[in-house]
Image (cartoon, helix red, strand yellow):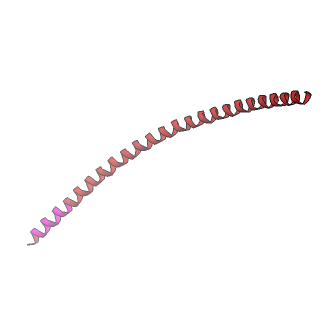
Amino acid sequence: MMIYVLICLSLSLAGVAGLQFFYMLYLDRMDKEQKKRLRLLETRCKKLIARLEASETQISEQEKFIQTIYEELGEEEEAWADTIEER
């Protein structure tokens, strides 16, 4: 009777060891996938930062251009005001 108990106990321990082994394989695979995903996100983040910086540069150039045009239009409006006052 004692032998059967020991056999059952050893099979149970072997099952637990197998379960732990496969769980370790699962965790290793998940770790590799997460690292791969993290590298992908870091690459995408760098690309987005570059696009953001380019967009900010373009916006600042457009604002300068608009300011220049606005100043030129402001000077022309003053010239028209002077012309109207002279008449």
Q: Nearer the viewer, residue 38 or 10?
A: 38
Residue 7 in magenta stretch: yes
Residue 20 position in % (x across, y down)? 27, 57
Q: Residue at x 18, y 63 (%)?
A: 12
Identify the main secondary structure in magenta. Answer: helix
Give the residue drawn at x 66%, y 32%: 62
Q: Is residue 34 magenta?
A: no
* Image-quadrant location for residue 8: bottom left
Q: Is residue 49 left or right of residue 65?
A: left
What span is in magenta? 3-14
- Quarter residue 81 falls in: top right
So how many labels did they put on this image?
0
Q: Is residue 64 left or right of residue 55?
A: right
Q: Residue furthest bottom?
A: 1
Locate residue 1, reporting x and y percent: 8, 72
- The image position of residue 55, as x and y in percent, is 59, 35
